[in-house]
Image (cartoon, rainbow, N blue to C red):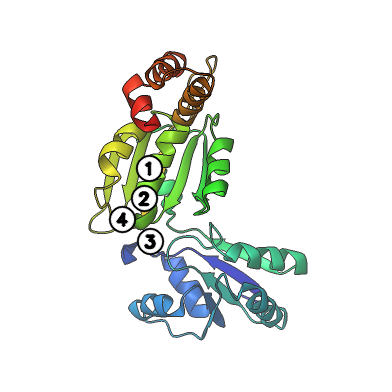
Amino acid sequence: MSNTLYVVGTPIGNLSDMSPRAVEVLSGVDFIAAEDTRVTLKLLNHFGIKKPMVSYYEHNKRERGEMICERISRGEDCAIVTDAGMPCISDPGEDLIKLCAERGIRTVVLPGPSAVVSALAVSGLETGRFCFEGFLSVNKKSRKEHLEALKNERRTMIFYEAPHKLPATLKDLYSAFGERKLSIVREITKIHEEVIRTTTKDAAENLADSGIKGEIVLVLEGRKDEDSPSYTFSDALEIARKLIGNGSKTSDAAKEAAAVTGFKKNEIYKELI
């Protein structure tokens, strides 16, 4: 080891998933860059590892990134870890890798558990082609634009979500994509691991307020009907509202929008009123 940044994957729940190589590298580096040093300390204590740590997270990544690269350039070895899973995936470690690339610092990856791939594997949906979309924005405009850009995506889509934001997200997915297969994978590798294979419609109507807790990954079916127009529930509402604006009655507008998009008249009518 010399002048190297090691990107070390750590368990996402079950500590038995820690690789022997990861333990060896964490034991051998000069210092560890951790998203939350308190979380990483528990991991290190479990494996009897004693190493100095520096915090490296979203709000200090610029100044700490420079400091970490400077120490590596002077001959030290560093390992970067996140609270759980692979660093740099939906994680500020991405910026540290870019800094190392700019400075010609050697980087070595130690593969570890990944919630993205693990959730996809047990989702029951197509795994040949997929895209990872991370967390949806809490900003309504940004969220709507993100989902709108994915409306015709044919690959399986994977999202991270926090439990307190899940109800709104399930409703937004149904509104944006219409009825599609959806797998809700939670607490991967932990005691309460669960895979809920459902649809966007059923999830929005029956699961949004069910109090689902834990670390959540959503796996969504891509668009299937290549030759036919793909309408979302939002499209159906927009069509109906335009008809109303042109003088149609609400019930007639809902009926016509249902005929065009394939959504149920009652669902459209209920949302309009």
- Which amino acid type is marked by label 3? Ile
- Tell me how far mark 1 sits from mark 4, CA to CA: 18 Å
Seen at 38% across and 28% down, the residue is 179
Q: Closer to the camera, 143 or 237?
A: 237
Which residue, given by chain and number where applicable, does mark 3 sit on?
12
Residue 101, quarter of the rendered image: bottom right
Q: Tell me where residue 113 appears, x and y as whole percent.
A: 42, 57
Q: Label 2, secondary structure: give it.
A: helix
Q: Label 1, secondary structure: give it.
A: helix
Q: Closer to the camera, 28 or 126?
A: 126
Residue 67 appears left or right of 42: right
Residue 166, label in figure = 2
Q: What is the quadrant of the N terminus in the image?
A: bottom right
Q: Tell me where residue 14 appears, x and y as whole percent.
A: 31, 62
Q: Residue furthest right?
A: 103
- Which amino acid type is marked by label 2? Leu
- Tell me how far mark 2 sits from mark 1, CA to CA: 6 Å
Which residue, given by chain and number where applicable, does mark 1 sit on?
170
